[in-house]
Image (tube, rainbow, N blue to C red):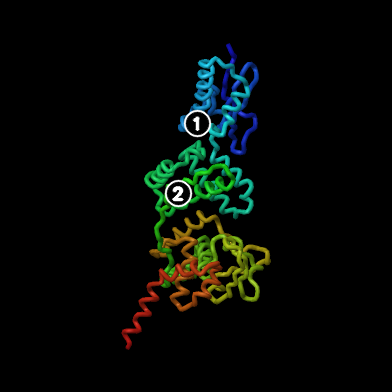
């Protein structure tokens, strides 16, 4: 009778996230074959017999690991029935066979892409991708490509909608993230089937928030009258954004040497194009005292911290519009259009690469249309 044993073991190498890969070891007549499962786990949560244990999602891990043993048991049973001897190479072929290929871990593939192609991403985009992966792991700790089918996508959408309470467009962004890596996997020959043929991404139009002119003036008055250093500092860079349309990422990095000949000249972080914004009196009114050219003009905090400060300012100023860095940029566009700025000038000042990016603001300038229609009252 042949001596065939099996055991799940951990790879010695520790991954960057502190986990170790699980290997299925099969020994045939003292010769071992090592099969990589693609599953990674923290050592404290692993037992060679009970496999994943001691945490909420342990069974999700084991659902992937159990078939490795079942496949071996079936093979041994079939060989015994046929009275054929099992060779080590037979076991290797059993798991190497393309039709029985081991599932490929989605998270490991994402990590690989981020470690290579991620070098071209902006730091904020890299951070967002890692956040998306973390959120996915909270929902499905072990995720292989073959598990991502239409049913899984629908279930994840429902989880985001009813449990996480995300709105339609936030869900759209998170599903689009998955689609990005599905497309890369198809490109790399990892998978063949495009699951998004059976699943349609959903989105809905959103109305951009902006400050009407009267509320902008309320914030300007607060900036002049406040005795709070924190409020004044926050309003300083927020109003600068309202007057220049600079994005949060550009506000954070603008230096004094970006201002030459009374013009802000800088390469935008998002699009990588050069934008030129002439200074006017309003912009000058919120510029701090000039320092060394290489010094940042504003000490801008993280987006989350800044938006919390703006929430406090909204309550102090008693304005209805919910304040954020995005609101500053949208405020510039809508007020500029309402005051008669041309679309071509607005497009250049905002650093848009397509006319469509600018035209979206024409949909939210109803005040301008109302005023224009009043010409009929004077005929």
Horizontal side of residue 199 vs 83, given as left or right: left
Label 2 CA crowd tier, 10 Å (few <14, some 14–19, many 20+): few
Q: Which residue is mark 1?
A: 64
CA separation, marks 2 and 1?
26 Å
Q: Which residue is mark 2?
A: 197
Nearest the viewer among 260 and 310 is 260
Label 1 CA crowd tier, 10 Å (few <14, some 14–19, many 20+): some
Across and down, in percent, residue 277 comes to: 58, 72
Q: Is residue 11 above or below residue 370?
A: above
Q: Residue at x 62, y 70 (%)?
A: 265
Across and down, in percent, residue 292 comes to: 68, 66
Q: Quadrant of the N terminus?
A: top right
Q: Which one is earlier in the sequence, the residue at label 2 or at label 1?
A: 1
Q: Is residue 109 above or below residue 232?
A: above
Give SS at disc 2: helix
User: Does residue 39 appear in the picture of this structure?
Assistant: no
User: Does residue 142 appear in the picture of this structure?
Assistant: yes
Q: Residue at x 59, y 24 (%)?
A: 91
């Amino acid at each position: 009778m042949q001596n065939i044993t099996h055991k799940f073991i951990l790879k010695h190498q520790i991954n960057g996230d502190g986990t170790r890969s699980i290997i299925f070891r099969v020994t045939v007549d003292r010769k071992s074959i090592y099969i990589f499962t693609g599953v990674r786990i923290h050592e404290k949560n692993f037992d060679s017999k009970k496999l994943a244990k001691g945490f909420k999602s342990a069974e999700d891990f084991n659902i992937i690991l159990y078939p490795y043993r079942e496949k071996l048991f079936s093979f041994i049973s079939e060989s015994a029935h046929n009275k054929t001897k099992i060779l080590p190479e037979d076991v290797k072929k059993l798991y190497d066979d393309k039709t029985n290929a081991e599932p490929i871990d989605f998270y490991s593939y994402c990590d690989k892409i981020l470690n290579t192609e991620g070098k071209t991403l902006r730091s904020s985009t890299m951070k967002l991708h890692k956040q998306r992966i973390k959120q996915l792991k909270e929902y499905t700790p072990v995720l292989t490509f073959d598990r991502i089918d239409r049913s899984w996508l629908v279930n994840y959408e429902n989880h985001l909608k009813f449990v996480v309470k995300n709105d339609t467009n936030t869900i759209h962004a998170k599903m689009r993230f998955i689609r990005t890596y599905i497309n890369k996997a198809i490109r790399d020959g990892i998978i063949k089937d495009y699951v998004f043929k059976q699943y349609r991404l959903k989105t809905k139009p959103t109305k951009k928030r902006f400050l009407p002119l009267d509320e902008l003036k309320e914030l300007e008055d607060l900036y002049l009258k406040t005795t709070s250093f924190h409020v004044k500092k926050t309003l300083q860079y927020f109003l600068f954004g309202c007057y220049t349309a600079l994005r949060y990422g550009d506000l954070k990095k603008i230096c004094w040497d970006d201002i030459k000949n009374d013009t802000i000249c800088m390469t935008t972080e998002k699009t990588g194009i050069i934008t030129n914004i002439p200074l006017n009196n309003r912009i000058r009114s919120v510029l701090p005292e000039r320092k060394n050219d290489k010094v940042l003009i504003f000490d801008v905090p993280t987006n989350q911290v800044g938006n919390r400060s703006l929430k406090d300012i909204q309550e102090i100023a008693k304005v209805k519009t919910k304040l954020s860095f995005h609101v500053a940029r949208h405020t510039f566009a809508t007020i500029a259009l309402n005051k008669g700025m041309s679309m071509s000038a607005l497009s250049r000042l905002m650093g848009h690469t397509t006319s469509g990016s600018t035209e979206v603001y024409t949909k939210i300038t109803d005040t301008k249309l109302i005023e224009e229609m009043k010409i009929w009252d004077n005929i």
